[in-house]
Amino acid sequence: MSQRLFWLFGITSLLLAQPPRPPIRPAPKAGVCPLPILPALPTLTETAFFAKADVPHGKVEQATYKNYAGADKRMHVYLPPDYAGNTRYPVLYLNHGGGGDDSHWTSENLKGGGSAQFILDSLIATGKAKPMLIVMPDTHVCANYEPSAPGKDDACTQEYLKDIIPYVDSHYRTKASRDYRALAGLSMGGFVVMHTGLPHLDTFSELFVYSSGHISPESLKQFDENFAPLLKDPKTNDLFRVPFYMAAGETDIALNNGQKDLALLNQYGVRNFWVLSTGGHEWANWRRYLFQTAQIMFPDCGAN
């Protein structure tokens, strides 16, 4: 073999031995709405932000409906202070955690309740949050820690789509479109957000997860397999009017699980907010997360 042929053969072999280069991903682009600035969290021990302040107060009422399986179900509904006339409002669907029910987010119990109505009363009075309805259903029976198969809605998703949302839109003055529906939840309720909200971004445009994340390696793998096509689709980011939000305390039992879910969002380029706070898996944090996120919900930008 001539020296020239030997040289060409060596170069060819070297090139063939190189691993294939990964495709170049397009540069990130801005979201459909201006990126909001996250307000600072109150301190872990602060109480003023959820106290019953001297401001106009909304109303919390109970509503009952029959779900698609024929069971009688109850929800708590917060109506903002100016709920009157013909004005229509956006809706936050807010989910409780394991061991809780639809009453816990409006309970005034310091260690077992969210005082959500007082948080919103004060934020609305100071112009820091949009007037909104908050719908708090009882999902302890239907919440599923494991992601359902692609294209197959779990029990909570079916109840939301078939019963809860239609009931709310028909009994209250809502802005009945995806642009004005947000879905949030703590702990177990975070699974409702992920398993109901992500596959139905045609129904919700904002998702907020407080202290939650897939528990087992198997469920995380299933979550990845089920949602990878959605998460890696560059068009998905345009469906979020506010970046996907996750928060957990630095001593939170759900911290590591949430970070693993967050890693998938980052892997696929999903725009997100990640908040690490003091404290653990407790109402002192969940009230703070609601306080923070309520201020960025339902931005003033064109409908998508």
Image (cartoon, rainbow, N blue to C red):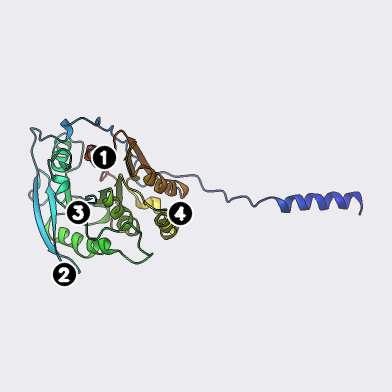
The residue identified by callout 3 is 175
Category of crowding for the residue at label 3, using alpha-carbon neighbours closer than 10 angstroms: few (below 14), some (14–19), many (at least 20): some
Q: Nearer the viewer, mark 2 or mark 3?
A: 2
The residue identified by callout 1 is 289
The residue identified by callout 4 is 232
Q: Earlier in the sequence, mark 2 or mark 1?
A: 2
The residue identified by callout 2 is 70
Q: Is residue 108 above or below residue 5?
A: above
Who's the residue at 20% across and 39% down the image?
A: 129
Q: For mark 2, give the secondary structure.
A: loop
Q: Is residue 294 above or below residue 101?
A: above
Q: Tag 3: residue type?
A: Lys
Q: CA distance from mark 1 to mark 3?
A: 24 Å
Q: Earlier in the sequence, mark 2 or mark 4?
A: 2
Q: Earlier in the sequence, mark 4 or mark 3?
A: 3
Q: Tag 4: residue type?
A: Lys
Category of crowding for the residue at label 2, using alpha-carbon neighbours closer than 10 angstroms: few (below 14), some (14–19), many (at least 20): few
User: Is 108 positioned to the left or the right of 23 in the image?
Assistant: left
Q: Quadrant of residue 223?
A: bottom left
